[in-house]
Image (cartoon, rainbow, N blue to C red):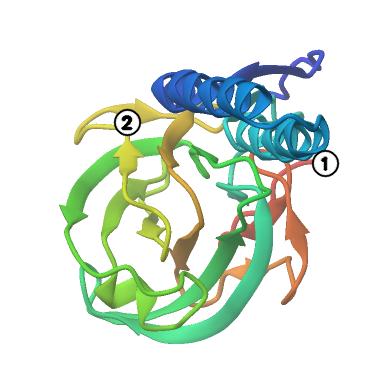
């Protein structure tokens, strides 16, 4: 694919947050109205409305849906599927799909990160699986195998397969995954959404050049995570 045209960055609210934002506004509104009329002093109302504004502001940030365009060549490139922080970069055994050793890169999304997820490579969707499970804290190693999760395998145009896993955290109770098996997918497209604290794992072939480090912050659909083996994209 050729270089993509630069576009202005826009921000909108993700449709996955519509009901949550609506009901949160109603509940907080009723609560503040009640406190205003229960207490003679203005202080409890001022405290409650300040806390409510902060909480609702966090929700608005959480349910942002930034419109981002990756501005460089995508061939052989793995782009960050999520905003967050890199918490794992290691060689490990992947026992769900590949059943061999892979390089695992994990991005942890805190409550303060946008939780929209992006497609990390151009290719064709080969596998989509959802697993029910526990809700351990998302940064724990066992979360990748024991928590509720959704797995997507994408085959790039040169035949390389990568696996992306959306993992629910202690607070997350819903994982949304949009692609279906057989569909073509591209960088810039949304892969899904995870509601509240969670992580995204990437399993890449051995020999992949990893371009991020532990504790590095990532920006979904902008940060380049890796270059796949034997592919050197043009600058």
Residue under the image location 56 percent in, 28 percent down = 28
Q: Is residue 67 visible?
A: no
Please state which of residues 219 and 171 is positioned toward the viewer in this rendering: 171
Q: Which residue is mark 2?
A: 178
Q: Quadrant of the C terminus?
A: top right
Q: Image check: 107 left or right of 135?
A: right
Residue at x 73% of width, y 24% of height:
3
Q: Nearer the viewer, mark 2 or mark 1?
A: 2
Look at the numbered discs 2 and 1 and tell me whether their residues touch, using CB distance below 8 Å. Answer: no
The local crowd at label 2, few if under 14, some if 14 to 19, many if 20 or more residues have their Cα within 10 Å, is few
Q: Nearer the viewer, residue 177 or 14?
A: 14
Q: Secondary structure at mark 2?
A: loop
Question: Residue 58 at what x, y percent from top left?
Answer: 68, 39
Residue 119 visible in the picture: yes
Left/right placement of residue 127 relative to residue 195 reads: left
x and y percentages locating residue 149 in the rendered image: 29, 58
Asked where in the image residue 144 lies, by quadrant, the reply is bottom left
| Side of 225 where 165 appears, left or right | left
Give above or below for 217 relative to 118. Answer: below
Secondary structure, mark 1, is: loop
Which residue corresponds to the image point at 79% horizontal and 33% vertical from the top-left? 41
Establish if 79 lies above or below 199: above
Q: Residue at x 75, y 73 (%)?
A: 215
Where does the image place residue 45, in percent across and percent down from the top left? 74, 31
Identify the residue position indicated by label 1 in the image: 235
Number of other residues with Cα within 10 Å of mark 1, as a class: few under 14, some 14 to 19, many 20 or more? few
Q: Quadrant of residue 100?
A: bottom left
**Label 2 to label 1: alpha-carbon separation:** 31 Å
Mark closest to the chain's N terminus, 2 or 1? 2
């Amino acid at each position: 694919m050729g270089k993509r045209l630069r576009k202005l960055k826009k921000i909108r609210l993700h449709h996955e947050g519509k009901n949550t934002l609506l009901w949160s506004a109603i509940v907080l509104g009723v609560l503040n109205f009640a406190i205003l009329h229960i207490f003679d002093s203005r202080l409890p109302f001022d405290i409650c409305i300040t806390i409510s504004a902060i909480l609702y502001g966090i929700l608005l940030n959480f349910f942002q849906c930034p419109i981002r365009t990756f501005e460089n060549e995508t061939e052989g490139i793995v782009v960050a599927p999520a905003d967050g922080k890199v918490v794992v970069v290691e060689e490990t055994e992947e026992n769900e799909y590949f059943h061999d050793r892979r390089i695992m890169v994990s991005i942890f999304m805190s409550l303060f990160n946008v939780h929209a997820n992006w497609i990390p490579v151009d290719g064709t969707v080969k596998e989509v699986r959802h697993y029910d499970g526990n809700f351990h804290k998302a940064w724990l190693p066992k979360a990748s195998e024991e928590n509720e999760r959704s797995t997507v395998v994408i085959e790039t145009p040169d035949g390389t397969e990568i696996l992306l896993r959306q993992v629910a955290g202690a607070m997350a109770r819903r994982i949304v995954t949009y692609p279906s098996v057989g569909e073509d997918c591209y960088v810039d497209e949304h892969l899904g959404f995870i509601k509240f604290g969670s992580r995204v794992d990437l399993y890449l072939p051995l020999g992949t050049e990893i371009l991020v480090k532990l504790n590095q912050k990532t920006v979904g659909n902008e940060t380049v995570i890796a270059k796949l083996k034997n592919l050197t994209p043009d600058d």
